[in-house]
Image (cartoon, rainbow, N blue to C red):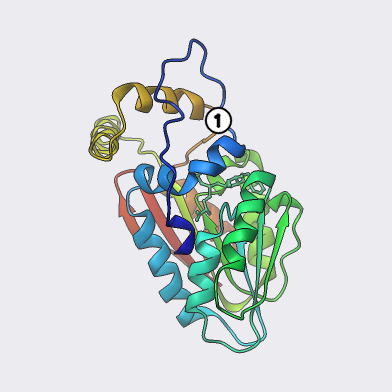
Amino acid sequence: MNNTDDKQADRIFAEPVGQVSPFCFDETVAAVFPDMISRSVPGYSAILSMIGDISERYAQDNSTCYDLGCSLGAATLAMRNGIQAKNCRIRSIDNSSAMIKRCEEAIALDASTIPVEISCGDIQQLEIKKASIVVLNFTLQFIDPNDRQTILQTIYDGLLPGGILILSEKVHFDNTSHQALMTELYHNFKRVNGYSDLEIAQKRTALENVLRSDSIQTHQQRLQQCGFSSADLWFQCFTFCSFIAIK
Ligand code: GEK
């Protein structure tokens, strides 16, 4: 992906701060985002690569593919380079202007001719129409849990028959000892990737009440309730997973 080149190092939580502010996707985060997400989400680059492969298989002629909560456009680029169907377009949206500015720059550097419409806005206000692929790559977790069923239903209704939703999320486990093990392994992953215990702790505090995870079962129940004919996990590492739901 072009936008993971020349990564600026994420040191946002490296120094102790008295009071940790709630996490937000501002310019400071956008500037280090490729480094932050690749060192914080196990399997992130593998998921992107598979989104490219899945797009090759599921993009339909004369349809739109959506990247909801696109950040710097990594999944947009993966889809754009995977799609083989004719007359496809991509709609990418994020409500962080700092992300969208950098996303536009990254897409402009990409050689593919598939049209991409990038906009700054709330995914909850977006109309989804004639969609063959919708990607929510680690975005739903930032939406109010009370609004999640509605947005998933809007996506389902806007998908063409045979269309798919790729939903990647951080999840939690109801079994306390399994949750503790997954958290420990995850923190170890972050340590191996160069984050200190202070950075891990401060980021965790910043994400409290901002990233609200669901269990795998809750996600699958919601997807079934929308009407998806299947909703299965295709990726999981610790508390990070991705579902493919087929209409
Ligand atoms: C990737 N998908 O690299 N409307 C629009 N955007 C939103 C909203 C909303 N209501 N809420 C949050 N966002 C990307 C990574 S990051 C995941 C996605 C992470 C946006 C927010 O601004 C941010 O850019 C993105 O969702 C989540 O494949 O940082 O863990």
Q: Residue at x 44, y 28 (%)?
A: 203
Give above or below for 95 relative to 78. above
Left or right of 135, for residue 43: left
Which sits in the foreground, 90 or 60? 90
Number of residue marks: 1
Mark 1 residue type: Phe
Left or right of 186, for residue 103: right
Q: Which residue is mark 1?
A: 23
Give coordinates of residue 243: x percent, y percent. Answer: 43, 60
Left or right of 189, for residue 225: right
Give coordinates of residue 79: x percent, y percent. Answer: 52, 72
Give coordinates of residue 186: x percent, y percent. Answer: 28, 38
| Residue 223 found in image quarter | bottom right
| Residue 104 found in image quarter | bottom right
Which residue is at the far top?
Answer: 18
Q: Residue at x 25, y 36 (%)?
A: 178
Mark 1, secondary structure of its residue: loop
CA neighbours of label 1 inside 10 A, class few (<14), some (14 to 19), many (20+): some
Give above or below for 55 relative to 48. below
| Residue 39 found in image quarter | top left
Q: Residue at x 46, y 29 (%)?
A: 12
Give coordinates of residue 159: x percent, y percent. Answer: 64, 72
Which sits in the foreground, 129 or 98? 98
Give above or below for 116 relative to 3. below
Residue 55 seen from this side: yes
Q: Residue at x 74, y 50 (%)?
A: 121
The quadrant of the rendering that contains the N terminus is: bottom left
Which sits in the foreground, 73 or 182? 73
The quadrant of the rendering that contains the C terminus is: bottom right
Residue 25 seen from this side: no
